[in-house]
Amino acid sequence: MTNYLKEYFDYKAFLLCLALVAVGLLSVYSATFDVGAAGAFEKQVVWAGVGLLSMLIAALFPIRALQRIAFPTYIVTLGILLVVLVVGKTISGSKSWFGVGGLGGQPSEFAKVATILALAAFLARTTTSLSNVKHLLIAIGIVVAPMILILAQPDLGTTVVFFAMLLPVLYWAGASNFILAAIIAAVLSAAAALFGTLTFLITLVIAGALLYLTRQNRFAAAVAFALTLAIGLSVQAVYERLPAYQQKRISSFLNPELDPKGAGYNALQSKVAIGSGGFFGKGYLQGTQTQLNFIPEQWTDFIFCVPGEEFGFLGASIVLTLFAGLLLHGIKVAYLSKNRFASAAAIGVTGIFAIHMLINIGMSMGLLPVIGIPLPFVSYGGSALIANMVMVGLLMNFYANRKEH
Amino acid sequence: MIYDEHFGSPQRRRVLTAAVLVIFGVLLLRLYQLQLLYHGELDKKSEENSVRALIREPIRGYMFDRNGELVVDVGPAYAITLIPFEFDKPGGGLLSSLLKMDSLTLEERIARGRIYSPFLPSRIKRDVDIRTLATIEEYLPILRGISYEIESKRVYPARAFATHLLGYRREISDAQLAQFSDYYRQGDLVGIAGLEARYEPYLRGEKGYEFVSVNARGQIIGSFEDGKRDVPAREGCDLLLNVDIGLQAFAESLMTRNAYTGAIVALDPSDGGILALVSKPDFDPSILSGVTPAELWSQLQSDTAKPLFNRATLTRYPPGSTFKMVLAAAALQEGIIDEQYRIRCTGAYRFGDRTFKDLHVHGSVNIIEAIQKSCNVFFYQLILKVGFEKWTECGRRFGFGRITGIDTGEETAGLIPSTAYYDSRYGKGKWTQGNLLSLAIGQGEVGVSPLQMARYAMALANGGTLHQPQAVRFIRNKRTNKLEEVSHDSSSVGIFPEVIALLREGMRRVVQEPGGTGGLARIPGTISAGKTGTAENPHGEDHAWYVGFAPFDNPKIAIAVMLENSGFGGSKAAPLAGLVMEKYLYGQLRRALPRPAPTKPDALKAITQAVR
């Protein structure tokens, strides 16, 4: 019986996930218990319950069927994102002068899952080869389509997450270093184009070096460099033609530290909070710093302050270890899976978790710019929690069926 | 099969595993650095030098009238703030006596602040006088967690009230706060009426933030990083108005002098700019300049004189004879009659088994004389020739039945009856041509606002253009020093110029010729034109109306006057219109003011004074 369980039940993923959800519930409770956000904790508990159920369903779903519905689901998801975009726009148009924000965060959480599965299904086709340019472009297109719709919402954080998921999956599926270098070069140049000529030129040099070092033939390298240059220049041209207010919106987007509402201030406070935790922390619910300043991000984007301050280095490093364990386990599941669809999807899931963790914890500790993305399983928020638990369910599913082709 | 041999290869697994370990390592190292290496410093910062963001309120935008006179100013108001976490209960007694606040209210405010944040200052009393502030300041060393903030309140240097035009602010409601929590916080004042509401996003500016270090007791011990991270507040934009505040004050004084209830709206016929907009009774807006006490607000709301109600834009009364130009325009435009067409007025008109009376026997009149003398019999017969649909259509051409798009806030669209309306109101075939006769002379179901009537007067003045009435002409951004012109819509009524010319001639005779009903609107030295009206009121005395413009050849001002329950338009409304137009055209009156109508006691004034 125990052997049977070990064979088919991925207790590692399950327990790691539950532990992280528990950390999340403790943290949300601590961050909200006396600041008038009553009900946040109770809601999170309910969502965790829903997440658990969804996780089990995802774990038991037949893989073949999953693979078959991957594309249709993906198309429907694109449709929903489009509707959100259009409806969202009309609402803000009629909402007179205050504008509206944050709409459509929910569908984009589930779009992650749908996109991973569609990409994996495409890469798993026996005829797909990443050395074929057409196939490569389709694979990139599958990720870029929802990315554009989400960027337009606008949600920079989620967009970054999508891009970060693409790279490991392509790498896993056999893409050459040159292809990865070309993609990175193109994105770097598009982003750098918005930061002025000097940054753009330096980026071009770096991109050129990357392409040169990974080149397989000179012609392809030259074409890739020309494309990189063209993308950068056209982004610049489009940007310059935008009306001033849109330019401003983009620049404050790329540099959230300029935000007058004090994103920089939040980051600073969070650094102080984590640092003041010391080795053992101040004790549960005793983190005065965490609760000193009421900012909504304290139970969403800056949730890591809570374990950091209240449980100290001991607690925070355990949280980090839980994440690292989950990521390494995800890679292992991908490696063990004989089914290429499952294997690629497992890497996609792992990539999503990794980038979320890196950016979120990195920004809490002042290592990375403040881009608003939540910490998986821990941050307050229903749709993200459920989507993340579904992804763990998928990992469990792939583990159980790892020996099947 | 082009299976890629690199797919999921052991080497690729090693690379990804290494990537995860690198990420883990970097984060762990940083954690180590913050929590163990820098712990002492950061812990000290947390305990002794916490950073706190203090909100710096922006200065709200000013308003200037068309001559550059300051109409709405800003002055300081002092708010006492309290940090719930630091405040000791024993200090409560002292505080409540200093603030002259009962301890229950004080406790309730502190509890509310605690919900917002136990660690941040929240305002427990706003707009305290300077003497209270000075006393509090003396006691600060023993009152922990107490401080004060400088806020701004409105100051009205002008002689006019212009309450309904300028509008006012109140503390933001919980519903608005829930919706707009990204900018506002509890207790913020937000425009809820008039220009203060409509131009709120321009007027309010942007809040600034000042970062200060505070010690463990919560006392500010200095600015944080020498204020390098501070974000200065941004001043709100100024509004440059079309309004002539001197004219506004004069028009208000005429209404107050006579204790009239009603409205005066004066527009610039060339662009629809609002020169004056009076609604009486009103109240001194400075009683709402800062934080409005709840009892004052409920008093204003329950006052039977309805001082909060903007009669200039929201009332819907029949316009009486002032509406006759609509029917005349329909008849002339459609070629149903021309100026030669005459009717003999015998002082009454029999239709079916009813007799419709006129005030006088006018004899043989054509359309111009019918307007001049306001001959009902002429128009009774005319509407039967013109027909219901054409009349309705012409009314709509002059903008009745739809809003004007004024930028001061709420307005009514009014009502212009149509066959469809009658069918639904009385039932198909249940109404007769007899109903039309009332409409011919602007009685019955027609409902118009004084603002719509002023727009109508404007179109007659300028030859047929309806401009969207705007109180604000420019918005001045004080950061960029740019003037942004507020655009307005304009549309043509689509009536032939010859037709408008005939209507104008009729209106000129109303004022200038013997036998006209509006002789009392005459302006010495200037030819003006207009039309009187008396709206029958089944509930009491008739409402007096007057619409007009001046000078006749090159109109500079178009006006509508509506006086509730005051009697004849020609005797009550017309003289007021004449005086207001004279004041605008000459800058002053060149004659003595007529004696005021017998006054009724002004209940509202008593309230206003009691509160102050």
Image: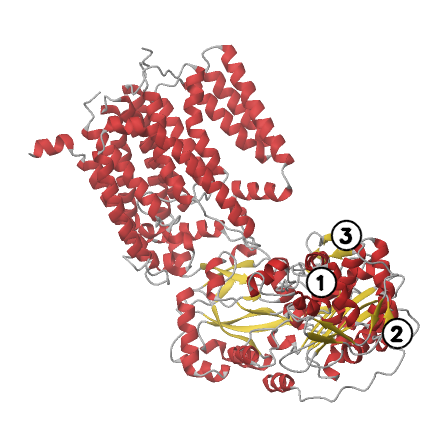
> Looking at the picture, how far across and down is residue B472, in whole percent?
71, 60
The image's mark for residue B471 is 1
The image's mark for residue B441 is none
The image's mark for residue B494 is 3
Q: What is the secondary structure assignment of the residue under circle 2?
A: loop
Q: What is the secondary structure assignment of the residue under circle 3?
A: loop
Q: Residue furthest front?
A: B353
Relative to B575, A312 lies left or right: left
Query: Label 3 vs label 2: CA separation?
Result: 30 Å
- Residue type of the residue flagged with mark 3: Gly
Q: Residues within 10 Å of mark 1 (few under 14, many from 20)?
A: many
Q: Nearer the viewer, residue B113 or B489?
A: B489
Q: Residues within 10 Å of mark 2 (few under 14, many from 20)?
A: many
Q: Nearer the viewer, mark 1 or mark 3?
A: 3
- Residue type of the residue flagged with mark 1: Ala
> Looking at the picture, how far across and down is residue B299, in whole percent?
55, 81
Residue drawn at the location 84% of the way across and 54% of the way down? B497
Q: Which residue is mark 2?
A: B523
